Amino acid sequence: MTPPSLTPSPTPPLNRDLRRPHARRGRLRSLVSGVGILTVGLTVTLGLAACGSGAPSGGDEATSAGTEAGSGSEDLTPIRVGAIPIGDVAPIHVGVKEGFFEEEGLDVEVVNTSGGAIAVPGVVAGDYDFAFGNTVSLMVARDQGLPLQYVANGTTTTGEEGKDFAAVIALEDSELETTADLQGQTASSNNLMNIGDTSIRLAVDNAGGDGADMDFIELAFGDAAAAVQNGQVEAALVLEPYLTQSLDAGLKAVSWPYAEAHPDLDIGGYFTTEEVIEQRPEDVEAFTRAMRKSMEYSQENPDLVREVIGEYTETDPEILERITLPRFKADFSREAMTALGEAAVKYGVIDEAPDLDALLPEGTE
């Protein structure tokens, strides 16, 4: 059977200068458009593709996302959390649904954002008390002098090659078979100089290859499979649900970069400013406790996670049942973050190794 063709959006010509590993261009762009992206994108019809572009369905770029628990109660502290409506943030919705935040005295409003262009300045300006962002984007933020810090983990690779929510895909008859084969190839990622290309380069290094000997172009996840099919790139990074759809279309997975970069690689989490942490410790501690409980409960109840994702996204229920969910664990891995930070420095994403004591929650081991 001939695999269905996936038609890409128009894509600009390749710019090799932007794809070299030590190119400094695009770092600030990665910061403002990349926070909370390159995470499992479960909003196909929304067109977000976890790319930080476009607005969520049913509203503007910042739209209240159903928070019934404790709403309007004078006894609860109102908290606004910016989060892209994708699978990574399911635990916070689970926590609201199950009343975990209300138990901590918080009335949490999850506000749909379209990416870091809203989330980072929103937190800095105080429009949001917390927001979800990916780990490399927060490293870039710190590198650029923004006083942001994680207070709770959000999403982690499953650590299983062959069963993760992110993979590099290629044509079924491609000579690319393993991660090491990506050396010397051109691949796509949805943002340059961010967690996608950095983790792929690190995975190639770990496989015995040279991650520096790769080129990258920027393509939205929704366009990546078609770009592989028409020969624009040899390989492409895709996340769920695009991974499942790509495999259905006859493409193959040749690498699982998040899992191969480090089996405990944390992809994103919830952050705020150092000022909020210093001036509102009780609110931060309450949010963190509720978030940890939400993470643990979500990991133990995958069926509920899928149900909740279906409530705040427009994902095909049949696809939703088959996608691979990320791992939800309460604690960050300092070891994995160290490896990612070293790779980010090596490949020119940031200037200096991140200060993990300043970036991660206190006590992270």
Image (tube, rainbow, N blue to C red):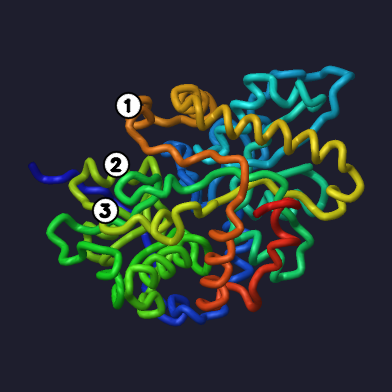
Q: Earlier in the sequence, mark 2 or mark 1?
A: 2
Within the image, what quadrant is residue 204 found in?
A: bottom left
Q: Which mark is residue 18?
A: none
Q: Quadrant of the C terminus?
A: bottom right
Placement of 364 over or under 318, stated as above or below:
below
Front label number (1 vs 3): 3
Query: Percent x, y for residue 194?
Result: 53, 64
Residue beneath disc 3 = 253
Q: Which mark is residue 318?
A: 1
Q: Earlier in the sequence, mark 1 or mark 3?
A: 3
Tell me if residue 33 can be seen. no
Q: CA distance from mark 2 to mark 1?
A: 11 Å
Q: CA distance from mark 3 to mark 2?
A: 12 Å
Instruction: Tell me the kind of residue under disc 1.
Output: Glu
Q: Secondary structure at mark 2?
A: helix
Within the image, what quadrant is residue 92 found in?
A: top right
Instruction: Tell me the kind of residue under disc 3.
Output: Ala
Answer left or right for 137 relative to 310: right
Judge the density around disc 2: few (<14), some (14-19), many (≥20) Cα neighbours within 10 Å: some
| Depth check, front residue: 248 or 163 | 163
Give the residue displayed 61% in from the left and 50% down from the top: 332
Q: Earlier in the sequence, mark 3 or mark 2?
A: 2
Residue beneath disc 2 = 245
Answer left or right for 275 relative to 349: right
Q: Quadrant of the N terminus?
A: top left
Q: Secondary structure at mark 1?
A: helix
Q: CA distance from mark 1 to mark 3?
A: 21 Å
Within the image, what quadrant is residue 172 found in?
A: bottom left
Query: Percent x, y for residue 280?
Result: 89, 42
